[in-house]
Amino acid sequence: MKELYDNNYYNEILSSRKKLVIVDFWASWCSACQMFSFIFEKIDKQYSNEIDCFKFSTEDGNIIPRELDITMIPTIIIYKGNKVIFKINGLPTEQMIMKKIGELL
């Protein structure tokens, strides 16, 4: 799982050759973000051939979160073909996010 920053966000998203790209916007002080990190690690391992998983710390950058209207964390954005196809604010359940991934693959 790779970290994204304001200066590499779009290059990494656009250069992905995988079917889906998932970005987790998080912060170290956010308990819901910490809980989602376990789910996100599982997704990264289970779908490593089909999905690129990235993390973006909102403590390390604020330009991209503003551009994407990230108003709460965690926020999960899923891209397909370099377009946002799904966005969820707050902590999704493992079942919900896995179901959504299955639908999108």
Image (spheres, rainbow, N blue to C red):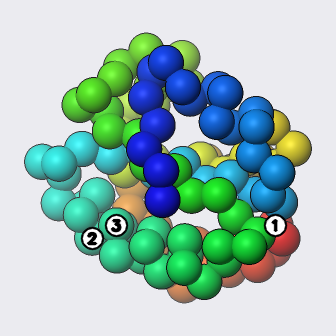
Amino acid bearing label 1: Leu
Amino acid bearing label 3: Ser
Question: Looking at the picture, how far across and down is residue 52, in whole percent?
Answer: 65, 58
Gap in angstroms between the C-alphas marked 3 and 1:
21 Å
Question: Looking at the picture, how far across and down is residue 105, in whole percent?
Answer: 84, 70
Comparing labels 3 and 1, the label whose residue is closer to the camera: 3
Asked if residue 76 shows in the view, the reply is: no
Gap in angstroms between the C-alphas marked 3 and 2:
5 Å
Comparing labels 3 and 2, the label whose residue is closer to the camera: 3
Question: Looking at the picture, how far across and down is residue 79, in whole percent?
Answer: 73, 47
Q: Which residue is mark 2?
A: 35
Disc number placed over residue 37 in the picture, else none: 3
Q: Residue at x 24, y 44 (%)?
A: 27
In the rendered image of this protein, does residue 26 appear above or below residue 95?
A: above
Amino acid bearing label 2: Met
Earlier sequence position, callout 1 versus callout 2: 2
Whether residues under marks 3 and 2 lie with C-beta atoms below 8 angstroms apart, the answer is yes
Asked if residue 39 shows in the view, the reply is: yes
Earlier sequence position, callout 3 versus callout 1: 3
Task: Assess disc 3: are there few (<14), some (14-19) or many (≥20) residues with their C-alpha within 10 Å of its C-alpha.
Answer: some
Whether residues under marks 3 and 1 lie with C-beta atoms below 8 angstroms apart, the answer is no
In the rendered image of this protein, does residue 58 appear above or below residue 79?
A: above
Q: Is 68 placed left or right of 20 in the picture?
A: left
